[in-house]
Amino acid sequence: MGGQASATGASEPSAGRHPGAAATAAPAAASGPCDLYASGGTPCVAAHSTTRALYASYDGPLYQVRRTSDNATRDIGLLGQGGVADAAAQDSFCAGTTCLITVIYDQSGRNNRLTQAPPGGFPGPAPGGYDNLADATAAPIGIGGHKAYGVYVAPGTGYRNNNTNGIAKGDQPEGMYAVLNGTHYNGGCCFDYGNAETNSRDNGNGTMEAIYFGNNKVWGYGEGNGPWIMADLENGLFSGVNQRYNAGDPSISHRFLTAIVKGEPNHWAIRGGNARTGSLSTFYNGPRPNVPGYNPMKKEGAIILGIGGDNSHGATGTFYEGVMTSGYPTDATENAVQANITAAGYTTSPSGPGGLTPGSKVSLRATTSCCTDRYIAHDDAGSGVTIAPVSASSGSTAKSGATWTVRAGLANSSCVSFESADRAGQYLRHANFTVRLNTNDGTAQFAEDATFCADAGHNGQGHSFRSANYPSDYLRHYKYGVYVAGQGGSHEWDSTTSWNDDTSWAVAQPWA
Ligand code: AHR
Ligand code: AHR
């Protein structure tokens, strides 16, 4: 067991405030994806990310960059244990020059790090036949309210480890996921992450098992025009049991995409979803392909990123995080990992919709002159929501009751949802146009009722939050209760009196 023990009680990172953002950064999650895989009995044996820790206890380097000005290298670590990347360290080290990503470290403790891929069946474009390294600044994003960088794979770029520890061999079971940019792909061979040949050559059917993402149709393909998540099993990208077309594998192109492939004796699966919100879908779950050579598998246990098993390097894509496991993970374990990924708060820029960053905490202050000391808060008990006075001298219950974690909107990731900071899984939602705190029951109705789109504040202050399913209604306080209200509608709380003020909210520093 070289992997890290499942972490408990990880301390919070030093809570950096992100200049210019409305709120503080999210604290480290209580568990990371690899803690969840470990609790499921299928621990990570490789864990790669340039954006965040994949264990709550991880506090080491994520990746190494090399700058062209003097060839010096620098490890890029975390803002805090279990937290997100310290991209500012890269920015200052690489100021005035360019940087390449030289190493993507393995957080699992097995030293399955990824480095510049060597020549194989195909030589790479760099000196000695190696593949190119990724430009360290080519894929900037936000995560948990901070800037981070992904691994931008242009054709010719590739990473590999041909001498691994603990990765599945032969027909041994394994799982893997990757978070990718679903809008950055091509039809070249092959943007892969996963298990491949240890000599960088095509050693025949079944000698690899990796996630593929792109719209290559040379081998398999799915519904529509792509891109598709497929499994690269060598001499074939498979979208299901058939060698070519499988109807169950949809085109999928979320900006942040969760892609999953897993395999065990005569059984494998493809799953995927939106890495910003929602759950995973299963696109294939069944026997090995009905083509000779893939049952049993002959996995060799190398790891590739951005290339095919034989070092084919015609493909493009962007990688943010991914792991490989020992053992075939359950769907339930992967669903928990997906919830962890969506909570991490990936955004296209460090600041999210309306300047509200998924993963960050906020308090929402009324701007009507009556009430500028009041914040949207839930009751101590029950599901009631009011605007309640909170100040520095308030007790911790009042403070945490008025603190909300911003989430990508449950029904629309261009909007936001507000999860209670002290009652995980419970969100502000309207029902009968009255706002309350309820547990997310996973229904489409709940998602719509709990999603608000940030507009400029109607009175010129802060934001007004438009209901996703009643777009002429906005989050409003009225007689200290909280509602969704139209301007001059049929409910008492639709009153036009001070509607602009009552529907405008200052996004304040979180009380808790
Ligand atoms: O299986 C598709 C590709 O075929 C593999 O990635 C590569 O090794 C071979 O060219
Ligand atoms: O919600 C408090 C106040 O109640 C609002 O400002 C006003 O609309 C109503 O009287």
Image (cartoon, rainbow, N blue to C red):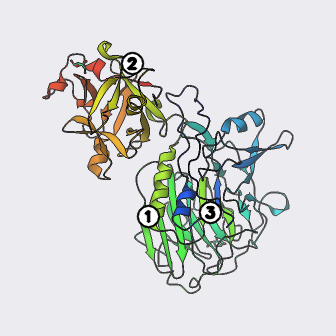
Q: Kindly report which numbered mark, 1 or 3, lies closer to the viewer in this rendering.
A: 1
Taking depth in this image into account, of 52 and 237 the one nearest to the observer is 52
Dot 1 amino acid type: Ala
Dot 3 amino acid type: Tyr
Dot 2 amino acid type: Gln
Q: Is mark 3 within 8 Å of ligand 1?
A: no
Q: CA distance from mark 2 to mark 1?
A: 43 Å
Q: Secondary structure at mark 1?
A: helix
Q: What residue appears at the point 24 percent right and 16 percent down from the top-left corner?
A: 498
Q: Which mark is residue 461?
A: 2
Q: Kindly report which numbered mark, 2 or 1, lies closer to the viewer in this rendering.
A: 1
Where does label 3 land, which residue? 193
Q: What residue appears at the point 41 percent right and 33 percent down from the top-left corner?
A: 400
Q: Which mark is residue 332?
A: 1
Q: What residue appears at the point 62 percent right and 44 percent down from the top-left corner?
A: 139
- Regarding residue 221, the answer to whether it shows in the image is yes
Quadrant containing ligand 2 reads: top left
Residue situated furthest bottom in the rendering: 292
Taking depth in this image into account, of 429 and 457 the one nearest to the observer is 429
Percent of width and height locating residue 299:
65, 77
Could you tell me if the residues under marks 1 and 3 are in contact, i.e. CB atoms within 8 Å?
no
